[in-house]
Amino acid sequence: MPIRYLFKQLFLPPGGLLLLLLAAWWLRRRAPRLALLCFCLGFGGLWLMSLPLVVEQAARALEPASALPAAEWSQLGQHSEVIVVLGAGRERGDPAWGEDVPSLQGSERVRYAARLARASGLPLLTSGGLHYGLPPSEAAIMADSLQRDHGLTVRWREEASRTTWENAQDSARLLASSGIKRVVLVTQASHMLRARWCFERAGFSVVMAPVGFLGVPNARPFGGWLPESKALWQSGLLLNEALGRLLYPLLYR
């Protein structure tokens, strides 16, 4: 995990773009043309990734065409047997809560899953292992939030997975004894198609329940052409997802 984390932070934006700017400074006298290229790529990449308009357009290419209609929530039990909520990291030791809590994305998934569970009556499974190798697991943190904040008891916790592929494989093993093969899958909209691919490879029939759409009108002044830090973070998430879409079919069969 530390090696994977190191390479991811160094070579994916913004780390990789900052390395290009560092290279531009280092090469400014030895190879001015190459330095200029590195500067343009680094600065241009940071600028583009910080634009809400770029986030909006990139997300539209990655996200499903539509959300799960609210009118269908109460009928989910006719097509599915469990709601699976995928982990999205955690906030470590938040003093306001006195404990670890789900990340912003994780909280969004938990809230949406709770709505679906109340409407459909389906049981819940939370999936997510140790974040950076430290307990408690993402699954346990989400289960605790569902119990305390929404009054819902999670029936299954999958607490060993480290990747989306492992989310699916470990959930399949956990549910095998119950014969469950039809799931409602809750995760970010940009992550949904890769997650569905993984769960289908694990033998599940999947109803997609995406949340947290980014491919919506950005509603910023000047059409989203001015940079902001939130857009930079969102662009990093989208780029990570795009790379995951390319690599997963090569890494997992």
Image (spheres, helix red, strand yellow):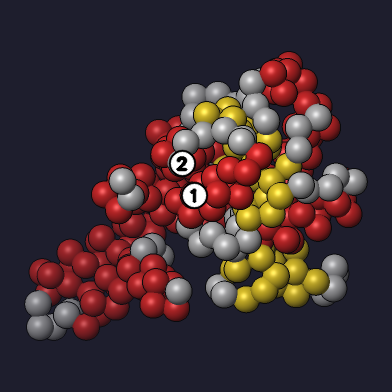
Q: How many marks?
A: 2
Q: Quadrant of the N terminus?
A: bottom left
Q: Is residue 135 left or right of residue 6?
A: right
- Whole-percent x and y of residue 226? 49, 48
84 in relation to 148, above or below: above
- Whole-percent x and y of residue 12? 36, 63
CB atoms of marks 1 and 2 within 8 Å: yes
Residue at the spot of label 1: 169
Of 172 and 142, which appears nearest the observer? 172
First in residue order: circle 1 vs circle 2: 1
What kind of residue is marked 1? Gln
226 in relation to 121, above or below: below
State how far apart marks 1 and 2 are (Cα): 6 Å
Residue at the spot of label 2: 202
Count neighbours of disc 1 (C-alpha within 10 A) and say few if under 14, some if 14 to 19, many if 20 or more.
Answer: some
Q: Is residue 81 left or right of residue 132?
A: right
Q: Which residue sits furthest front? A: 177
* Residue found at x 52% / y 29%: 205
Count neighbours of disc 2 (C-alpha within 10 A) and say few if under 14, some if 14 to 19, many if 20 or more.
Answer: some
Of 86 and 157, which appears nearest the observer? 157
Tell me, yes or no, if residue 225 can be seen here. no
Q: Is residue 82 left or right of residue 23?
A: right
- Whole-percent x and y of residue 108? 70, 46
* Residue found at x 75% / y 69%: 100
